[in-house]
Image: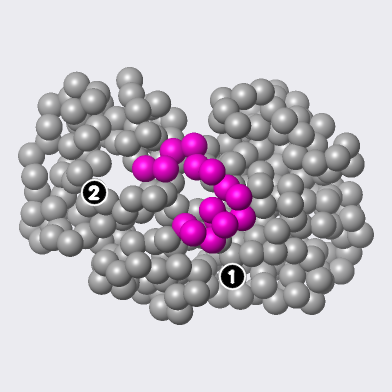
Amino acid sequence: MNPAASPRPLGPPDTRLFTFGCGYSAGHFVSGLPVEEVMGVTTRSLDKAKGFAARGLQPFLFDGTGPGEGIEAALAETTHLLVSIAPGEEGDPVLRQYGELIGSGMPDLQWIGYLSTVGVYGDHGGAWVDETTPLRPISKRSRERVEAEADWLLLARRRRVPLSILRLSGIYGPGRNTFENLKAGKARRLVKPGQVFNRIHVEDIAGALRLLAARRENAIVNVTDDEPAPPQDVVTHAAAIGGFDLPPEVDFDSADLTPMARSFYGENKRVGNARLKSLGYEFFFPTFREGLAVLKP
């Protein structure tokens, strides 16, 4: 499938998707579907809601602090539910506001998708991990993800509905990639010996979601590329193929980083994607090289 192809139906004519949190990743998935298959999308922003409406989508305002107007009625007709909102200290906002309805009051519900993160695995000193690896999250945000995953798994089991949990690695794509950082003069070649990261192109997130949703898979899958690589290597490659000056190397220990940026480097692992491939998924962009090649300015 060409990731740039025109929208294709996800399923039969009665397929109706509702998406909580239609941001960068979920938005790419939704944009590949006919608008008539999309029951609705949520956003926190009135301006973004107007943008969705201009594209023929039904937007709903939802910030997690209370129910959103019209959402309950839309969920009552939903067959496929996608959740792409991060949890917080008080748990998952979708479950907090709509857990009871999703658990028993959506008569047509056939599948739930939940976008999570490979951060749930924590640090493994550069070793390979897969979906059977015990979860030992380090950061607060990753611990909240583990709790949210467990809550969605419990709901899905009680409801007896298939649930796909997609654990995503570092997301990149149009408008969000190393070339953008190079153009803005913000790219750095941070060097921490032995450090690697996996990445995933946003179109492969959309592709994996399409496969899992269409087949109503009940699975936890890592959605990640084939080649975990040192971050400085990605910057070097992008600079070379994009014609940019190569930023100097910066030692990680002496680098001026925000606490959040530094925390990402506290987790070092190689994430395997064999389970997703075993379900029949073929990557558009197996490594950062193929992904950057199509994004090259």
Which quadrant of the figure contains the C terminus? top left
Would you identify the image quadrant in which residue 159 lies? bottom right
User: Is residue 276 shown in magenta?
Assistant: yes
Residue 218 appears left or right of 240: right
Q: Which residue is more in the foreground, 134 or 20?
A: 134
Identify the amino acid type marked 1. Answer: Ala
Instruction: Label 2, secondary structure: give it.
Output: helix
* Residue 39 percent coordinates (x, y): 80, 41
Q: Residues within 10 Å of mark 2 (few under 14, many from 20)?
A: some
Q: Residues within 10 Å of mark 1 (few under 14, many from 20)?
A: many
Which quadrant of the figure contains the N terminus? top right
Residue 201 position (above or below residue 157): above
Q: Which residue is mark 2?
A: 231
Instruction: Label 1, secondary structure: give it.
Output: helix
Residue at the (13%, 27%) spot, across then down: 245
Residue at the (32%, 65%) spot, across then down: 269
Q: What range is drawn magenta here?
A: 273-287
Residue 126 position (above or below residue 192): below
* Residue 108 percent coordinates (x, y): 89, 55
Residue 113 appears left or right of 248: right
User: Mark 1 or mark 2, which is nearer to you?
Assistant: 2
Q: First in sequence: mark 1 or mark 2?
A: 1
Identify the amino acid type marked 2. Answer: Pro
- Considering the whole magenta stretch, tell me its main secondary structure: loop
Residue at the (74%, 52%) spot, across then down: 215
* Residue 53 percent coordinates (x, y): 72, 28
User: Is residue 153 shown in magenta?
Assistant: no
The tag on residue 148 is 1
Q: Which residue is more in the foreground, 129 or 67?
A: 129
* Residue 268 percent coordinates (x, y): 28, 65
**Mark 1 and mark 2: span between their CA atoms?**
29 Å
